[in-house]
């Protein structure tokens, strides 16, 4: 089957899967600059926004049957290459329900943004997610990478995670089965549909005060008003990537419209129309400089996905690609 035929088959499967319902929101050749916090990246062949879990299942099965790769994209902490993404990108922004369960649990669907979840927990008088108030990610993406700050990470607050497997089956796994580490979780193949968080009852004003303090510290030290993918590198053990990059004299260093933030050196900001090949060239430059000066090899925290464009004059991001080919975005391979 040619690629075009696979796309046609996918669309047909999706329509026929539920003839009485309008199909999920689908866009062809959709620029990923519209769907990433970095505001850069080429087009996805198809972008699908399912309305609910049932529709997500139809999308997953249709992609599987058509032999198309499927990527679930939150949009933060990810850099999409200039050549775009082959296959189906799924955005779970409509899976956005939050439910308080009993006295100390919260269920949230994968598309819920963490700051909204943190505020909902605060309103319910539940403590444990205050640190998430300033993280611009979705529940799904944040679980996949065990998102966190110096004040905490998601893993200890997770009770269970519900995943959809590539065959459409839905399974719920307890936290212990997911083997979380610093910015990493071991999830079986599939995409996160929802999660249950276990929190502690606490006075609402205390929770609010903590969130306010954390937000204040974050906006004083990070470039929150410029497009970025968050911290580019993981912190090396016992040190800070931002400190090392600043000490290497790289604050403000710029390639095209990609620039090392003047405010926090572990952020690369998009000054307007940054191409991903410029962002990747800057990441490589920063990594090399830090290695040469301090002998520290920085490991990427952001995930690089998609295909490199064959642009005239663009440097080949081969080293970065080989290091990151197993992207941490939720990817379900084609059959
Ligand atoms: N520093 C510098 N120069 C800089 C940035 C930082 O010297 O340009 C120094 C600071 O002065 C401080 C130390 O480095 O002494 C640590 O900085 P900071 O407190 O800003 O924290 P971080 O380690 O750089 C981590 C997370 C952030 C999170 C903050 C706040 C990682 C890779 N980064 O940053 O998470 O927001 O703590 O809790 O774990 C992200 O994951 O995308 C992210 C931004």
Image: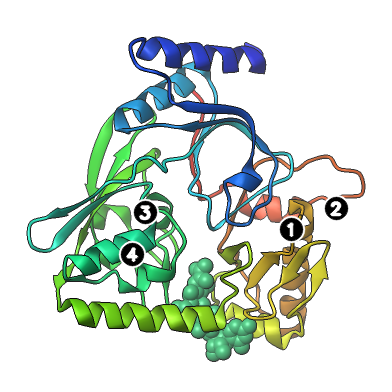
- Which residue, given by chain and number where applicable, does mark 1 sit on? 280
Callout 4: few (<14), some (14-19), or many (20+) C-alpha neighbours within 10 Å?
Answer: many
- Is residue 196 visible to us here? yes
* 149 displayed left or right of 173: right
Instruction: Residue at 82%, 65% (x, y): give it.
Output: 255
How far apart are the alpha carbons under marks 2 and 3?
34 Å
- Which residue, given by chain and number where applicable, does mark 2 sit on? 315
- Is residue 239 visible to us here? no
- Which residue, given by chain and number where applicable, does mark 4 sit on? 154
Disc assigned to residue 139: 3
Mark 3 or 1 closer to N-term? 3
How far apart are the alpha carbons under marks 3 and 1?
26 Å
Measured along the vertical axis of the image, is residue 46 above or below residue 316?
above
Measured along the vertical axis of the image, is residue 309 above or below residue 144?
above
Direction bottom: furthest residue? 247
Specify how the rendered protein is coloured. rainbow
| Closer mark to the observer between disc 3 and disc 1 | 3
Helix, strand or loop status at disc 3 = helix
Q: Number of labelled discs?
A: 4
């Amino acid at each position: 089957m040619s690629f075009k035929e696979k796309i046609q088959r996918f669309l047909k499967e999706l329509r026929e899967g539920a003839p009485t319902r309008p199909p999920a929101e689908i866009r062809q050749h959709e620029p990923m600059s519209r769907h990433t916090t970095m505001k850069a990246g080429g087009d996805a062949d198809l972008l699908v926004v399912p309305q609910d879990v049932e529709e997500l299942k139809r999308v997953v099965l249709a992609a599987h049957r058509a032999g198309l790769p499927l990527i679930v994209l939150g949009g933060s902490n990810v850099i999409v290459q200039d050549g775009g993404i082959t296959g189906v990108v799924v955005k779970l922004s409509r899976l956005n329900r939050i439910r308080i369960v009993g006295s100390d649990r919260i269920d949230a669907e994968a598309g819920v943004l963490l700051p909204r979840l943190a505020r909902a927990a605060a309103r319910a008088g539940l403590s444990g997610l205050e640190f998430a108030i300033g993280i611009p990610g979705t529940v799904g993406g944040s679980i996949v990478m065990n998102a966190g700050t110096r004040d905490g990470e998601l893993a200890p607050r997770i009770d269970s995670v519900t995943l959809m497997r590539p065959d459409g089956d839905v399974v719920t796994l307890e936290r212990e089965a997911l083997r979380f580490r610093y910015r990493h979780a071991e999830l079986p193949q599939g995409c996160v549909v929802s999660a249950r968080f276990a929190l502690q009852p606490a006075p609402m004003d205390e929770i609010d005060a903590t969130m306010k303090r954390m937000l204040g510290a974050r906006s004083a030290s990070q470039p929150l008003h410029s497009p970025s993918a968050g911290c580019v590198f993981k912190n090396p053990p016992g040190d800070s990537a931002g400190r090392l990059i600043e000490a290497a004299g790289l604050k403000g260093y710029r390639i095209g419209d990609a620039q090392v933030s003047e405010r926090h050196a572990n952020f690369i900001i998009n000054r307007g129309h940054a191409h991903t090949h410029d962002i990747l060239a800057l990441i490589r430059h920063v990594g090399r400089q830090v290695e040469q000066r301090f002998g520290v090899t920085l490991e990427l925290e952001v995930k690089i996905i998609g295909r490199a464009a064959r642009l005239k004059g663009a440097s080949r991001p081969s080293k970065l690609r080989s290091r990151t080919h197993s992207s941490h975005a939720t990817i379900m391979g084609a059959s």
